[in-house]
Image (cartoon, rainbow, N blue to C red):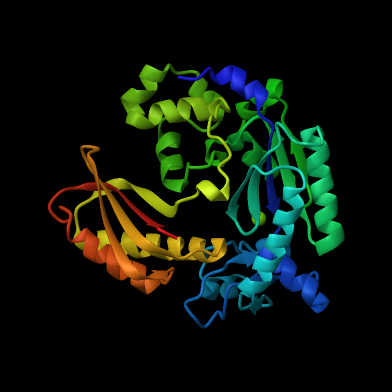
Amino acid sequence: MPDCHSSLLKRKIIHFDMDAFYAAIEIRDNPALRGKPVVVGGSPNSRAVVCTASYEARKYGIHSAMACSKAARLCREAIFIDPHFEKYQAASSHIREIFKQYTALIEPLSLDEAFLDVTHNAARLYAVTIAKRIQKEVQNTLELTGSAGVAPNKLVAKIASDMKKPNGLTVVLPDQVTSFMQNLPLRKIHGIGPVTEKRLTALGLKVCSDVWKYSKAALSLHLGNMATWLYERSQGIDEQPVETERVRKSLGKEETFPIDLLELSSLREELAKLTHAVARHLTEADLKGKTITLKVKYDNFEHITRSQTIEHFTRDEHVILEVTTNLLSKTEAGRRRIRLLGISVSNF
Ligand SMILES: [Mg+2]
């Protein structure tokens, strides 16, 4: 185990996240939309889902991944726009160029957010100075705003960037990590979704410091192998390095179910949801791959993977779903309970 504390003190990470990116670009390019509830996704009469909602639209409870039809019911004045990925891609590349002036250690998470490791930046600037300069430059050259979080690691930087949106900057120094995490709802930790949140709430764990009251051993009685992960995250500990795009070899998503699944129909439903998410991430990252991998974790934590390599590069949802459905039939799905499914695409 590396010494967490010493490396915590050493790294300087910026998480930069554009504000309502797709919607902001559409509004910039059509000022008549300014101040209006704008939803980028597709027609409310289609099966389209919301990619990005403007801040005005969010006031009605509209958020990304929601069905556009539902968004239309929540806000009758909402303006629906089809996504223009080429345009977002172009803006994203431009932002990437701005990042590159400060560091080569950039890990894009999607078109509109990235981690930057500026520990050893050439100009020897403070991380805060770099974050401010990036914000200013993005605003001057692209007429868009972004929010930044500056922290000793990726976990804290990502939470920080979300604190003062839009156009916000939140700095968490190494000796402020503990107080920053203390009253933070566990839901804010990347990786804790609504399902896990419910499970933790049932145990009386709502904010990070609730976790600190327990020993790792006591936690693992209730949470199994998630305990160590939660124990560290709740303290703001995260050792994951910033991974540049060159080392990105696959893109995927996995889902742990609140209850282990046996029914094939439910598993296929989950597979479809995962495929949808992966296809969208591939589009956002502008990647296509040839190898599709399915990961299955059974209820005893044993996990297996099944892969298939196809002839053409793809990010097509239907193709990926066909392959993963076929791969699922090569597992013990339907005969053994499954706690997790994962899909990834590689061989870009
Ligand atoms: Mg964003």
In the orientation shown, which residue stands out farthest toward the bottom?
45
- The residue that appears at 81% across and 63% down in the rendered structure is 142
In the displayed structure, 339 sits above or below 239; it is below
Residue 88 is situated, as x and y percent measured from the top left of the image, at 66, 68
Q: Nearest the camera: 206 or 339?
A: 339
- The residue that appears at 38% across and 50% down in the rendered structure is 254
- The residue that appears at 58% across and 28% down in the rendered structure is 236
Residue 140 is situated, as x and y percent measured from the top left of the image, at 87, 59
Q: Write down the quadrant of residue 221 in the picture.
A: top left
Left or right? Give the position of 338 relative to 165. left
Q: Is residue 143 visible?
A: no
Q: Is residue 197 visible?
A: yes
Q: Nearest the camera: 41 or 131?
A: 131
Marks counted in the figure total: 0
- The residue that appears at 61% across and 33% down in the rendered structure is 184
The quadrant the C terminus occupies is bottom left
Residue 198 is situated, as x and y percent measured from the top left of the image, at 43, 41
Q: Nearest the camera: 123 or 107?
A: 123
The quadrant the N terminus occupies is top left
Left or right? Give the position of 264 relative to 35. left
Which corner quadrant of the figure contains ligand 1?
A: bottom right
In the displayed structure, 36 sits above or below 263; it is below
Residue 79 is situated, as x and y percent measured from the top left of the image, at 68, 77
Q: Write down the quadrant of residue 36 in the picture.
A: bottom right
